[in-house]
Amino acid sequence: MASAEIITVGTELLLGQLVDTNTTFIAKALADAGIDVHRETSVGDNAARIAAAAREALGRADCVIIAGGLGPTVDDLTRDGAAAATGRALELHEASLERIKAMFARLGRPMAENNARQAMMPAGAIVLDNDQGTAPGFIVEEDGRALIAVPGVPREMKEMITQQVVPWLVKRYGVEATIVTRVLNTIGLGESDLDARIADLFHAGVNPSIAVLAHYGQVDVKLTAKAATRAEAIAMLDELEPRIRERLPDCVYAVDGGPIEQVVGELLRARAWTLATAESCTGGRIATMLTSVPGSSDYYLGGVVSYANEAKLDFLDVAPDLIEQHGAVSAEVATAMAVGVQAHLRASCAIAVTGVAGPGGGSEEKPVGLVYVALAGPDETADVRKLMLPGDREMVQRRAAMAAMTMLWKAAR
């Protein structure tokens, strides 16, 4: 099976000024074609460092894909780096120059002289035409290995990778296998707990392999299978998935799904339930998550951010004696908040959160991270959970909002 490395070029990547989405796209395209990606590297706009990275990668992999640095400006140095890495001179590719001139003519714009730099190619390179922009790509074969350069502009890169690079690689290296991935989206279980439940499967699995990817309040379990055909790979995943699910009951909320708020919305819509929210320590995060989903007005009616006790009394009808007896951060008040906003907005169900997000405001009895999440459901049912959430203020708020989503998901599924 062919192996690959990916190099992305751009000083802005190293300064954190640009999020690298190109590597993700290229890696997935290669994996879908059955080509293993062994390493990913980013380098700045420096010809010597680009050349060094390319030489090192060519010493390890069958093919190296460089994305970026093919534009017309003085800091676009991938051509120079690739030529140096393969010991070739740069030569003008006349057909590419004519294509660039023709594109400017179609746009009715004069071509700046520096655009001709984009038609300079390492000697003997296979040229990759760019139908989406002006910078062509190229392939240089060296001792049975291939150095491939594509533009960094995502639209141009994607077209070139899917239409030219991947088909060339599959043919060149006789790739017959494929790689298929499946992601089990889980919620309500921490990374370490989840890992402990599937540790034996994780260590035993080479193909299919298992990876655990943690996010705030949720964990993804990624299954990857390699086989001669896509159907065989899918069959391998179909055999493994139930074994994973057995270890994670009431945790998998979707397969290759979207965020939990999208799945919760789909469930609410399917049940024809409406939802209201009452938030104290989360400050509106739950409402923000819900309304980030297009069409959420089908089921989400609105909410109240009741930070002050007076807001809980005036807008949610929380009884004063509940706060006096139990405090604003309590199971009793959380439940009253949920019932109150459900009644005010005449919703099928409601979720409420109250807690101590910190960094101040905690006590020995009610420390920072203490959160109560309450759900008022149809038929006057109610449920409340007490949580101790680690982290700083933002992490406590995020985790509390995810806990609320977990309760909604379990109630609506």
Image: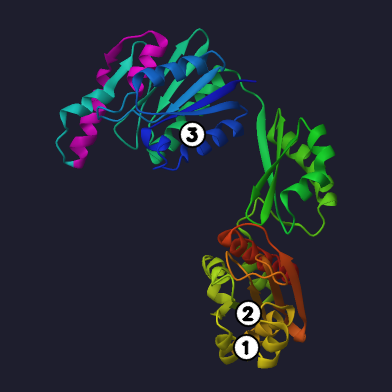
* Relative depth, front residue between 321 and 293: 321
Q: Which residue is label 3 attached to?
A: 162
Earlier-in-chain disc, 2 versus 3: 3
Query: Mark 3: few, some, or many residues within 10 Å (few <14, many ≥20)?
Result: some
- Horizontal and vertical percent for residue 371? 68, 70
Membership of 361 in magenta stretch = no
* Relative depth, front residue between 182 and 319: 319
Element under label 2? loop
- Horizontal and vertical percent for residue 199? 81, 40
Q: Which residue is label 2 attached to?
A: 274
Element under label 1? loop
Q: Main secondary structure of the magenta part?
A: helix
Mark 2 touches mark 1? (CB < 8 Å): yes
Q: Which mark is in front, 2 or 3?
A: 2
Element under label 3? helix
Q: Which residues are magenta?
A: 78-107
Q: Residue at x 77, y 49 (%)?
A: 194
Q: Residue at x 60, y 67 (%)?
A: 357
Q: Which residue is label 1 attached to?
A: 346
Mark 1 touches mark 3? (CB < 8 Å): no
State the separation of the CA atoms marked 1 and 3. 51 Å
Q: Quadrant of residue 320?
A: bottom right
